[in-house]
Image (tube, rainbow, N blue to C red):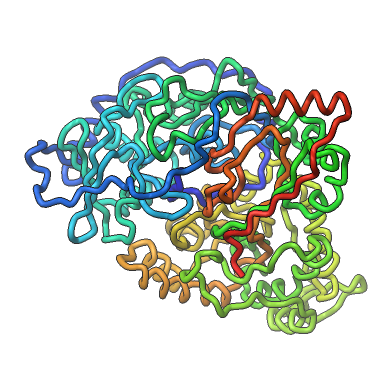
Amino acid sequence: MKLRLHRWIWLLVGMGSLFSCARMEEAQPYDSTAEVEAFYEKEKDFFTFATAEDVPKDLQWQDGMEQPEIGDELATKGGVVNRAIAAFPPTYRTFGPNSNHSFRGEFHDNIEMGLVNLHPDTMEVIPGLAKQWAVSKDRQTVYFRLDPEATYSDGVPVVADDYLMTFYVYRSSYANAPFYSQYYGTQYKNITKYDDLTISIKLATAKPKTAYFAALSPMPRHFFHEFGSDYAQRYQWRIKPTTGAYLIDEDKTRKGRVIVLKRVKDWWAKDRKYQKNRFNPDYVRYRLVRSSEKQFELFRNGEVDLYSLNDPRFWNEKTEIDAVYKGYIKKAVFYNDYPRVPRGLYINNSKPELDKVDVRVGMQYASNVQKLIDFDFRGDYRRTNIFCSGYGKFSEPTIRAREFDPQKAREHFAKAGFTETGKDGILKNKAGKRLSFTISVAQDPLTNRIVLRLKEEAKKSGLEYQIESLDGTGFFKKVMSKQHEICLWGWGAGPPYPRYYQNFFSENAYEKGSKTPKPNTNNITVTVDPRLDRYSLAIRNATTEKEIKDNSYAIEKVIHELAPWVPGYHRNYYRFGYWRWLKFPQKALNVRVSSEPFEAHVHWVDTEAKEKTLVAKRKGDTFPESLEVYDRYLVK
């Protein structure tokens, strides 16, 4: 499993409406080679060309082969996994406009290979596209020897120039990708090509887990040779050759309806130690079904192989069905050790009244999240206290989210000028402005239950929440353009360390020199504070784990003080139901650090079991009812 630095994006979006138009006409071809070479020449301090003799002779090379295998040796290849998705991807691009969508992990993040990866059970560095690596004594430069057998899905070898290309495309203004431009422009100092299979990458500062932070995914030169000012349009629906096991199957995919991944024929890494028992099905078929209720109906009928049961209503009620009683469908709960999604109400600090700390603190006291957990989630979820929880020793342990308290809420609202109560019970200020704000959400039955509960409870504090339910596309665009007042949102979180920079650094809040919110950045609360800048930058540039810990503790205290969001809820597990022909490793799924059962691709399809199950279903025969509990990683 590739645990990427940018795995923070988790969206409540649906994007299917973008596909009512026919496939756009291909742009005229051109070659950007000269422009790329001119860029390298201009940035000659960053892009260095050396020889194999220039590689230091005293390096200690590692190969990471001491870690346990991933997956199950009983896994078999073949078959089709049928899944449902609520939103079709708006583009096949993995960076640039609209690329941070909910499907990105399925065809890129969990599949594409970096130079090295992190083992999903031990969190130690294991090989990816690099067969060996060595870290300099100052822990700032990493030398990589590429696997000579590594190729893209189109058969073209992976070479050193593809990594130079990575820096070119990410730093280019053509990409229109502010995060990547910022990150790759500030966090790296140099890339050196020694020969086609040997490179070194120098970080801006020394890092713990240095090899992991220096690891990149390659950008194939032959695919990006037309990269230019029309990148977003030209590459909108082009399928990038992959180094991983799966590729979008253009022949079987129907835009706006079905997207299919196919296992790469003769994948170069299929016999490698950490890959051989993974990526087993021949195809993964994703059918667009916007309604969660409809998705469940397809699941109970066997047209979808697995369904998430994290919603207590589905876990406790919807699975009281014959298919479960008769053993055709199994239920499972897996307790994981994974950073928790910071899910809650994100408050746009640039909007009138919401720019006041007392209003935001009052909103925290007025939001009865605990009642939501106790009644709507039946006590199955936990209250989130801090922005980056679930990172072990790096997560601040003493801060507690402000509990529901209408009296304290009103005290803070009064400090912000909302002292009078209207006939409807909603507070207003002397100018007659009501204490009323809109929560924007993506259409979904569970989301609707959440915001209706919060709306009902907020009235007790004199606060009105209006609800704006949007289709996924409209919701995503509104939030990323910073036009919302409040939104129900959650960012994807990933190991190994907390990250705050993209969410709270001031450069990501406003356009330079203006009070216009900066679109398409992850600072959706439009928060600006010099302390947040200082601490988030210190974490990004930390050279030791102690620095990460100390600054994480400090920044959480500032976030708690400023109240740019209302902390919500999280789980320390994931629950799912699956048809008995779908198989998982018996050793607690073998993926301690995972957020959902398919993430590490350790599952497989037992075609014989599928045939037996379908025959039994027709005849009315049964199997033992099954509830599997994997609690090896349950944090007490």
Q: Quadrant of residue 116?
A: top left
Above or below — where is 508 with respect to 389? above
**Closest to the observer, 189 or 319:** 319
**Closest to the observer, 248 or 179:** 248
Residue 172 horizontal/vertical position (percent): 35, 39
Instruction: Say which residue appears at 63% left-offset and 37% top-offset.
Output: 583
Residue 135 horizontal/vertical position (percent): 22, 53
Above or below — where is 611 with respect to 130? above
Q: Quadrant of residue 460?
A: bottom right
Instruction: Say which residue appears at 32% left-offset and 54% top-offset.
Output: 187
**Looking at this rendering, what residue extends furthest in the right direction?**
423
Q: Is residue 22 left or right of residue 104?
A: right
Q: Is residue 561 left or right of residue 369?
A: left
Instruction: Say which residue appears at 75% left-offset and 58% top-offset.
Output: 438
**Closest to the observer, 404 or 603:** 603
**Closest to the observer, 301 or 152:** 301
Above or below — where is 350 with respect to 585? below
Q: Is residue 394 left or right of residue 147?
A: right
Q: Quadrant of residue 354?
A: bottom right
Q: Is residue 423 left or right of residue 544?
A: right
Q: How many numbered discs?
A: 0
Instruction: Say which residue appears at 61% left-offset and 70% top-offset.
Output: 636
**Looking at this rendering, what residue extends furthest in the left direction?**
53
